[in-house]
Amino acid sequence: MAPVITCIEDLRQLAQRRVPRMFYDYADSGSWTETTYRANEADFQNIKLRQRVAVNMEHRSTAVEMVGQRVAMPVALAPTGLTGMQHADGEILAARAAEAFGVPFTLSTMSICSIEDVAAHTTQPFWFQLYVMRDREFIERLIDRAKLAGCSALMLTLDLQIVGQRHKDLKNGLSAPPRLTLANLVNMMTKPRWCLGMLGTTRRGFGNVVGHAKGVSDPASLMRWTGEQFDPRLSWADVEWVKRRWGGKLILKGIMDAEDARLAAQTGADALIVSNHGGRQLDGAPSSIEALPAIVDAVGSHIEVWMDGGVRSGQDVLKAWALGARGTLIGRPFLYGLGALGQAGVTKALEIIHKELDLSMAFCGHTQLSHVGADILVR
């Protein structure tokens, strides 16, 4: 009998059963003690909503705009590395689900399916996320490939100059590319659905890197390349360089401080994302939702402020919107859906979040999300 899926947690539990441990743990973990990773989700629970009654709840709409793009709700699929290891052809499936639902999909630099692959299997523009590497010629070509594929926005991640230590990845032997240890192979044998999917696709490496980066042609050279390429020298001058090279909509991801938010706004970028990388970088940093209000106060009138980290429901989206976020990004919720049920699971995750957002908005006395403000929160 098919499982009854009512919430994101149901998808998480199903994904945990169906995805090999090393890849599930990669998606569902933080750095060091995972304090910030847990706080991202838990701190939403401390925000309370005002319930209103005797209000006409007909003709509701959660549709808004994110960087000028009309969206069904203020939610985009976040860039997540190794998405194609949660489910075969994962990036393509997630992009298709997002397109059909009317929300943006963001492809990671460290995706399994390439920019060209995703473009060939979708009909609407998607966003592309960029890491700045030491090999600037590779980055220039990557930006040009995103342009050629028709990507409508570039998302520059600023908080991965160096990589935080994630204990689960070390214990599972996760690397780039993944090491197939005996323990990992035994665990994969208990996931027949996943194995059949992976046997049916040729997309198992980093599609944006292999064959495109200088000297990267096989797993050994890829491992060397990824180990040395993230650039610790990344500066605001590099942001200006990327902006000029790209020439289109630019989104800056990884802002957690009001002063950095002011610097981000000064670059002329179109949006910034309050994000601690899902609790996977600086453990002990505030949750994204805790950091959000001060950043909105500092720059919300100069640049679109979005947030990600800990969003697990439509109520979380509503709370973030009420605190000034004009968009949210979801990573783990769609990955759980993908690992659980493929494209249908991503669609289910979006349906769950949208329904929760729509109903919660109505219970708070509103029919148009664009009219919702901080007055829906209990102070």
Image: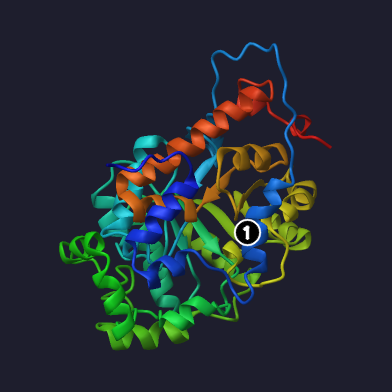
* Quadrant the N terminus occupies: top left
The vertical placement of 190 against 168, above or below, is above
Query: Foreground residue, 244 or 92?
Result: 92
Residue type at mark 1: give it.
Answer: Ser
Residue 27 at x, y percent in the picture: 46, 64
Residue 250 at x, y percent in the picture: 54, 54
Q: Extreme front residue here? A: 1
Q: Which residue is depicted at the point 32% across and 71% down? A: 206
Residue 335 at x, y percent in the picture: 42, 55
The vertical placement of 144 against 78, above or below, is below
Residue 252 at x, y percent in the picture: 59, 58
In the image, 375: left or right of 11? right
The vertical placement of 157 against 95, above or below, is below
Crowding around mark 1 (Cα neighbors within 10 Å: few <14, some 14 to 19, many 20+) is many
Q: Secondary structure at mark 1?
A: loop
Q: Is residue 215 visible?
A: no
Q: How many marks?
A: 1
Q: Extreme left residue here? A: 200
Q: Which residue is mark 1?
A: 275
Q: Extreme right residue here? A: 379
The vertical placement of 61 against 65, above or below, is above
